[in-house]
Image (cartoon, rainbow, N blue to C red):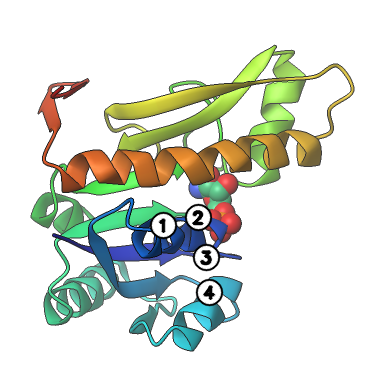
Amino acid sequence: MLKIAVFVSGRGSNLKAIHNAIVDGRLAAEICLVVSSRDDAGALTWAKSQEIPVLSIQSTSREQLAASLLAALDQQQVNFITLAGFLKLIPAEVVSAFRNRILNVHPALLPSFGGPGMYGHHVHDAVLAAGAKVSGATVHLVDEEYDRGPIVMQRCVPVEDDDTAADLAARVLEVEHVLFPKALELFAQNRITVQGRRVSVIK
Ligand code: GRF
């Protein structure tokens, strides 16, 4: 059974999508911890209302961040981490303790439109500025760099001629809510193998 920590910074719609998949019986998992990089994140309020243990990360050194994360993950017996809008870089100590057991959802088709500074509306602004005709969501494993780890699942959405960044963000977000729980389900079923950058699904 996956014992998941969900790392957030904002409203937490992906957190709720994961929660719904668990409640509906689509995902054999438990959300054991919600970690937020912001005190005022809506996701944090929601997690508290669900009586999920929470950790709010204050601005600290990389070493302190790693130590407090590892302590909380250990205390809640977390065996899988999901990043849903978490804005801080995951410390290398945490990446190596959870190698191939950290998933992020990114609101564009990696390896394009990712990396430092590519979050929120910046991603969709860049997609529109590039004139791309498709965008989408990517679920990928997390390594020591922003948005670089092996890709697990992607799904496209069209970019319409009159789209604003907000229009595109809303269209991509709908797909994220389907894709993220589906990717987690594959990990829960032990059906994922990773060889270098290639991630395969055992049928
Ligand atoms: C999502 O768009 C996700 O792709 C990105 O951050 C956003 C988080 O949204 N990494 P929410 O807090 O899950 O609603």
Residue under numbered circle 1: 18
- Alpha carbons under labels 4 and 2: distance apart: 16 Å
Q: Which of marks 4 and 2 is nearer the N terminus?
A: 2
Residue 133 appearing in the image: yes
| Earlier sequence position, callout 4 versus callout 1 | 1
Q: Are marks 2 and 1 in contact (CB under 8 Å)?
A: yes
Q: Do the residues labelled 4 and 2 touch (CB within 8 Å)?
A: no
| Of marks 3 and 2, the one in the foreground | 2
169 relative to 201, above or below: below
Label number found at residue 14: 2
- Residue furthest toward the right? 162
Which numbered mark, 4 or 1, is in the foreground of this view? 1
Total number of numbered discs in the rendering: 4
Q: How packed is label 3: few (under 14 Cα within 10 Å), some, or many (20 or more)?
A: many
Amino acid identity at mark 2? Asn
Please report the residue visible at 10 percent of the width from the left and 56 percent of the height from the top: 97
* Residue at the front extreme, as displayed: 24
As drawn, the label of residue 9 is 3
